[in-house]
Image (spheres, rainbow, N blue to C red):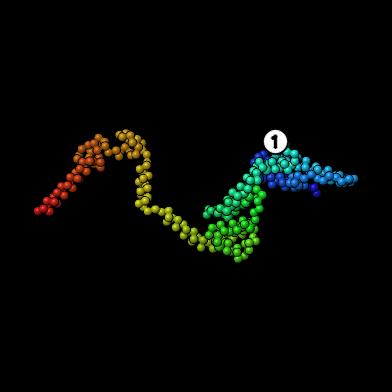
Amino acid sequence: MSFTPPLPPVFAGENYHIWVVKMKTYLQAHDLWSVVESDVEPPPLRANPTIAQIRQHSEERAKKHKAMACLQNCVSDVIFTRIMACDSPKQAWDRLKEEFMGSDKTRQQQVINLRREFENLKMKESETIKQYSDRIMATVNNIRLLGEDFSDSRVVEKVITTLPERFESKISSLEDSRDLTTISFFELVNSLYALKQRRASRQEEHPEGAFQEKDREGSISSQKAKKPWFERMEKSRKDAGRRRFPPCIHCKKTNHLEKYYWNRLDIQCKNYKQYGHHEKICKGKEKAHTQQQVQAKTTEDLQAQE
């Protein structure tokens, strides 16, 4: 039964790292990758070749043109103008690689940056094991796309050494049942996830302990969130001070109601029975209080002298 691979998506200038993998597989399926990789002409025919040898030689020479046709038809017209002057599929392939992945020096610098990024990866407290593993594999895949080898054992070691303390018991359980030096990255992630599911099932079977722990955590959280009464009062007072009211008809300010404006002609001061201000802002009251203190002090001094 013949197999015809589907055409890869047309490369229009974006996601080159995805297109190049699909294109390479496509060319390999058609037995055309060798002419892109090496660009070596088939050896010339010997004297008195047979019909089979002539046919085979013709097919080998045609591979170069078939690969070129695949590359030209799997890129957009804008990209085609950049490889239309290339004489061989290898030259066209290298041209695209240099433009969209950079030169060898640029790629080497990218690898260095990605390796540094990999070394600095750590799991966040808010992350799940799947989210963290996705971040790690995204960085590793970018390194591998640049042609650098990156072993699974190194990725596994990175995960184990950067997991938070809450995974320590799970790692210990895995060490008792598996050889972590031979486990693959995806086996590690799936095993950690399976342990999590198993513990969740145990908590469902014995909900009392889980509920007690949850209530204890909720109580601690509520205690932390609850503030003393004087802090709440102070906050309410500050919030009230920031409130805005309709403009006062007397002073035009918006930080108080009209009834609390105490310099009105219709208000009688209870201290001196005079109109024009409230006793709370009466300056005469302060003077009277001061005079009373002075008189009391003088009386005490006279009594002491007698």
Q: Which residue in the rendered view is the most extreme toward the bottom?
A: 176
Q: Which residue in the rendered view is the most extreme toward the right?
A: 48
**Residue depicted at x 37% and y 41%:** 243
Residue 80, above or below 211: above
**Residue depicted at x 19% and y 40%:** 272
Is residue 148 or residue 306 the one in the foreground? 148
The percent position of residue 255, horizontal first and vertical second, equals 34, 39
Q: How many marks?
A: 1
Is residue 266 or residue 120 the one in the foreground? 120
Judge left or right: residue 150 versus residue 166.
Answer: right
Residue 51, above or below 151: above
**Residue depicted at x 11% and y 51%:** 302
Is residue 34 or residue 123 the one in the foreground? 34
The percent position of residue 280, horizontal first and vertical second, equals 25, 42
The percent position of residue 211, horizontal first and vertical second, equals 50, 60
Q: Helix, strand or loop at disc 1?
A: helix
The percent position of residue 209, horizontal first and vertical second, equals 51, 63
Is residue 195 or residue 300 the one in the foreground? 300
Residue 240, above or below 179: above
Give, as a three-letter code, the residue at label 1.
Thr
Judge left or right: residue 209 versus residue 176.
Answer: left
**Residue depicted at x 85% and y 45%:** 45
Crowding around mark 1 (Cα neighbors within 10 Å: few <14, some 14 to 19, many 20+) is few
Q: Find disc 1 in the rendering and name its residue.
A: 81
Judge left or right: residue 127 versus residue 72.
Answer: left
> Can residue 65 be seen in the rendering of this structure?
yes
> Can residue 70 be seen in the rendering of this structure?
no
State the image quarter where residue 74 is shown.
top right
